[in-house]
Amino acid sequence: MSAAADHPGPDHPRQAGRHLLVVEARFYEHISDLLLDGALRALEAAGASHDRVVVPGALEIPAAVRLGIGRYDAFVALGCVIRGETSHYDIVAGESARGLIDLAVRDGALIGNGILTCDTGEQARLRADPGGKDKGGGAVRAALSLLEIRSCLRT
């Protein structure tokens, strides 16, 4: 079976009416602005509605997602972790990802992970830019894809 035949994708009309929670860490505001811009464009293109909450940093994203389980169809995690001179980067990058994976596997939360983990601010900017790699839009499309997969598997 081909994936296209079985899984219509995030722009399929069935995405209209979906309600997502965007959880945004604004530690690097200029990167967050780009991620959010891409995410909002993807939500609009899919016809999905959303609420948005802001948290201080990437480590707080999983807790905010957990608070929304049962109220939203899916979640979009947006943030950025840039490597510094200490091991703090490894902790924040690893634990924020682990927290999201735990919520997905243990609790069935459908999460598009748009937390960038980069060595430099320039790498982060290129990945966040909607005209570049558009990781914010990609996180929305991932969440919507998971919704579509769940819908296909339940029917």
Image (cartoon, rainbow, N blue to C red):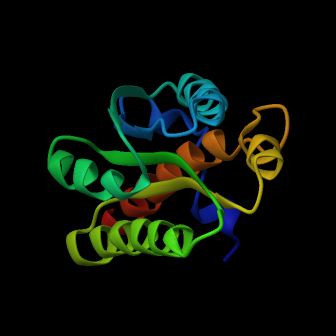
Figure check: 106 above or below 41: below
**Residue 134 location in percent, x, y?**
73, 41
Q: Is residue 63 left or right of residue 95?
A: left
> Could you say which quadrant of the image residue 30 lies in?
top right
Relative to 108, say whether 130 is above or below: above
Q: Is residue 22 left or right of residue 33?
A: left
Q: Position of residue 77 (x, y in %)?
A: 45, 49
Q: How many marks?
A: 0
- Spot the residue most to the front: 85
Q: Residue at x 75, y 62 (%)?
A: 119
- Residue 31 location, x and y as percent? 65, 36
- Quadrant in which residue 85 is drawn: bottom right
Residue 11's quadrant in the figure? top right
- Residue 153 higher or lower than 128, as above or below: below
The location of residue 145, given as percent across then percent down, is: 53, 54
Which residue is at 39% across, 75% downward?
A: 98
Of the 4 image quadrants, the one containing the C terminus is bottom left
Near-viewer residue (121 or 78): 121
Quarter occupied by the N terminus:
bottom right
Front residue of 130/94: it is 94
Query: Residue at the spot x=71%, y=41% of the render?
Result: 128
Figure check: 27 above or below 42: below
Give the residue drawn at x 31%, y 52%.
60
Camera-side residue: 57 or 97? 57
